[in-house]
């Protein structure tokens, strides 16, 4: 364990937590053990262990941030739902039903793309890899779908107004 002090210090500096830093050190040594037959390919095992430490810490911090964002989002949704007036709740329900019906009225390729983008909140690159389409084609299709949905809403609003 010749580099454990240095690995720990770096992990602690990035993580700011003793227990998590100790876990990172253990994971680094597990990764080094898995690479034990290939270590002679590296010029510096110390540099490799530092790089592994850094990457593990950054991955852990990303997961932590994602989990915190999800928890905050759920808390906000819960607070919004429980602090709403009955009128707001009914408005939200009607808006949701309208959006669902608008999406359902779209032709199939657009319906799927709008669902992925706006309901599942996927990025364009993720959608492109999922449906095997060009990102620009996806943007154009979603833009046309939005325009079509606006036209439907405008027609309904015109009939409501009349």
Image (cartoon, helix red, strand yellow):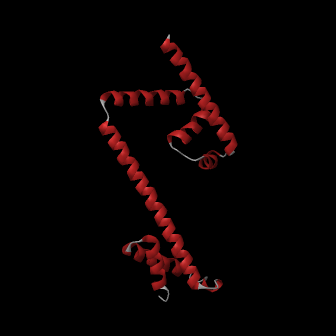
Give the residue displayed 56% in from the left and 41% down from the top.
117
Can residue 149 be seen? yes
Question: With 40 as the anchor, is 18 left or right in this view?
Answer: left
Can residue 133 be seen? no
Extreme residue toward the bottom, this view? 2
Spot occupied by residue 153 in the image (x, y as percentages of width and height): 53, 23
Tell me if residue 129 comes above or below residue 94 in the rendering.
Answer: below
Spot occupied by residue 97 in the image (x, y as percentages of width and height): 44, 28
Q: Nearer the viewer, residue 130 or 126?
A: 126
Give the residue displayed 56% in from the left and 84% down from the top.
46
Give the residue displayed 41% in from the left and 26% down from the top.
94
Give the residue displayed 44% in from the left and 70% down from the top.
15
Question: With 67 as the anchor, is 146 left or right in this view?
Answer: right
Q: Quadrant of residue 154?
A: top right
Q: Nearer the viewer, residue 76 or 3?
A: 76
Q: Quadrant of residue 155?
A: top right
Extreme residue toward the top, this view? 162
Spot occupied by residue 133 in the image (x, y as percentages of width and height): 67, 44
Spot occupied by residue 2 in the image (x, y as percentages of width and height): 49, 89
Question: With 61 as the anchor, is 42 left or right in this view?
Answer: right
């Amino acid at each position: 364990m010749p580099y454990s002090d240095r690995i720990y210090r770096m992990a602690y500096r990035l993580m700011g937590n003793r227990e998590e830093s100790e876990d990172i050190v253990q994971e680094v040594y597990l990764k080094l053990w898995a690479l034990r037959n290939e270590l002679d390919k590296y010029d510096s095992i110390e540099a490799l262990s530092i790089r592994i430490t850094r990457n593990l810490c950054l991955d852990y911090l990303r997961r932590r941030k994602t989990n915190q964002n999800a928890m905050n989002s759920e808390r906000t949704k819960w607070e919004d739902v429980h602090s709403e007036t009955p009128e707001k709740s009914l408005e939200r329900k009607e808006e949701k039903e309208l959006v669902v019906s608008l999406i359902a009225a779209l032709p199939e390729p657009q319906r799927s793309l709008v669902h992925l983008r706006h309901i599942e909140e996927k990025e364009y690159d993720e959608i492109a890899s999922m449906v095997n389409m060009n990102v620009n084609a996806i943007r154009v299709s979603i833009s046309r779908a939005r325009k079509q949905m606006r036209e439907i809403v405008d027609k309904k609003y015109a009939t409501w107004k009349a």
